Amino acid sequence: MRNCHFAVMLALASTGLFAFGAAAADGLAGPQSPRDLGIKAGTNKRIFAHAPAYRRMNLCNIHFHKSAEHKGGDFTTPASDGKGFVYDGAAPRPQTGDFCKGLKTGDTIELHYVFSTAAVSPGPGLAACTSPAIANPQLRVEAQVMVLVDEPNAADFARLTEIGTRDAYHQALNIPRKTGRPIAYAGSTTGPEFNDKESPLQVWWSVRPRTLKVDAASVGRWCQANIFNEDHAHGVRDLVTDPARLSPIR
């Protein structure tokens, strides 16, 4: 979950209070993400409220990362560059195409649907998740790992990212429902900028355990034009493994 446009977070991070060496050692920071979903243990003492179901929150952003940030389900194989994890199944060979400034068929991505309790509309970056009326909304991420393929029955990324309103809430209308029961836990925002410091933002995560095959060309078309101004895959944060930096998975 990218953070670079979230003004509140940047202001907090710039104070140095959330530097990895200080916050983590002193137990000041809340539970972090991403994590190994197969390990339920966590001893972080910071507690925050369970976010509402995404259907009772507003979609504020959609973006994705190259390789899965989380490890679990059928995405436990370390990426060849050591950054994140990839689909455990057979990848297409040879890899073809050039989508979203560097993606090819066979690449794994982790898609993040970001939701906020603030009265906001979908837009670029996490700045879209706050409003002048609510600067500290609850945040939720519905995450789906995907592998890019060139197959006739693969999912259409345009449909997966279609947005609209339901019951007066901004929603992603076609979040996958057949990729396993989501693994839910309390964590944080992610991204490689937090490899050497803690994220100060609290996020409730739901990560689906089965990888979805998605049409690579449809991902490329989305990167060429979308309301989130997303044109490439973002980097991944290193896996958080210290139990003191993790919440328990119930």
Image (cartoon, rainbow, N blue to C red):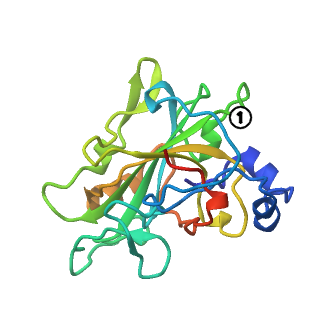
View extreme (left): residue: 152
Q: Tell me where residue 26 appears, x and y as whole percent.
A: 81, 59
Q: In the image, is residue 240 above or below residue 168?
A: below
Left or right, 24 with reference to 31: right
- Quarter location, residue 15: bottom right
Q: Amino acid at mark 1?
A: Asn
Q: Secondary structure at mark 1?
A: loop
Q: In the image, is residue 152 above or below residue 48?
A: below
Q: Tell me where residue 171 appears, x and y as whole percent.
A: 42, 31
Please give the name of the residue rendered at 73% of the width and 29% of the height, measured from the top-left corner.
132
Please give the name of the residue rendered at 58% of the width and 65% of the height, measured from the top-left corner.
240
Please give the name of the residue rendered at 75% of the width and 61% of the height, measured from the top-left corner.
24
Q: Tell me where residue 144 appears, x and y as whole percent.
A: 38, 51
Label 1, residues with CA under 10 Å away: few <14, some 14-19, many ≥20: some
- Quarter location, residue 98: bottom left
Left or right, 80 with reference to 49: left
Q: Which is more toward the observer, 240 or 197? A: 240
Q: Which is more toward the observer, 244 or 117? A: 244
Q: Can residue 232 be seen? A: no
Q: Tell me where residue 148 appears, x and y as whole percent.
A: 29, 64
Please give the name of the residue rendered at 22% of the width and 81% of the height, measured from the top-left corner.
94
Q: In the image, is residue 127 above or below residue 241?
A: above
Q: Can residue 1 be seen? A: yes
Q: Can you identify the residue that label 1 sits on?
A: 136
